[in-house]
Image (cartoon, rainbow, N blue to C red):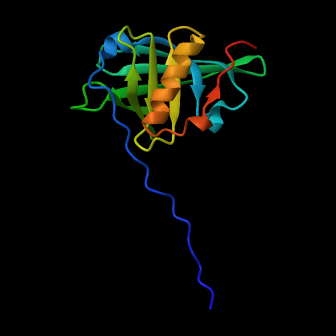
Amino acid sequence: MSKKYSRKKSPAREPETVPSVDVGRYCGTWYEIASFAPKEERKCVKIKAEYTLNSAGYVDVRNSCRRKGREKSIRAKAFVVPDTGGAKLTVRFFRFIKGDYWIVDLAEDYSWAVVSGPTMRSLWILSRTPYLDDSLYSSIVEKLRERGFDTERLVKTMQRE
């Protein structure tokens, strides 16, 4: 008699976020240094995000990249999740598509950040500049590995065409 075994995915662990984020200070331009390369970003270079604090209290988001020599962009709105110190946001695209944006690491001077979601299946390393020093990048990746992220999945983003 043969038994069928189902392969269940192990439950994803929830990453710890930073204790607090000054959302106004976090706003501005961020360049993607590396990510788990979501399918929306495949074949993209020069990926960046621009965040602007809106007078209504939410953040206007503009994500852009270059694909086949042309700029592609998408707009969204991000809302701080209450009682998270500004470290968790809900991003809404096209009114009905939502995503979680959790800041899991952040430089004291807000020069770089690491963003994930609640399942650790998404990851972005961001910088205020298009390039990050190799030793700093390596130390960020090592910290993420120690925290349980599958850093082997990280793909560096090309910031030039």
Question: Horizontal and vertical percent for residue 102?
Answer: 39, 31
> Which quadrant of the structure image shows residue 77?
top left
Please give left or right for residue 10 compared with residue 67 in the image.
Answer: left
Please give left or right for residue 159 compared with residue 129 in the image.
Answer: right
53 above or below 118?
Answer: above
Question: Horizontal and vertical percent for residue 27?
Answer: 40, 13
Question: Horizontal and vertical percent for residue 82?
Answer: 23, 32
Image point (50%, 9%), residue name: 128
- How many numbered discs, if any? 0
Image point (52%, 27%), residue name: 141
Question: Horizontal and vertical percent for residue 17?
Answer: 34, 31
Please give left or right for residue 33 compared with residue 61 in the image.
Answer: right
Image point (57%, 12%), residue name: 132
Residue lying at the far left of the rendered structure: 83
Q: Is residue 93 visible?
A: no
Q: Which of the image's four quarters has the N terminus?
A: bottom right
Please give left or right for residue 40 compared with residue 150 in the image.
Answer: right
Residue lying at the far bottom of the rendered structure: 1
Q: Which of the image's four quarters has the C terminus?
A: top right
Q: Is residue 85 visible?
A: yes
136 above or below 34?
Answer: above
Q: Nearer the viewer, residue 130 or 141?
A: 141
> Which quadrant of the structure image shows residue 159?
top right
20 above or below 98?
Answer: above
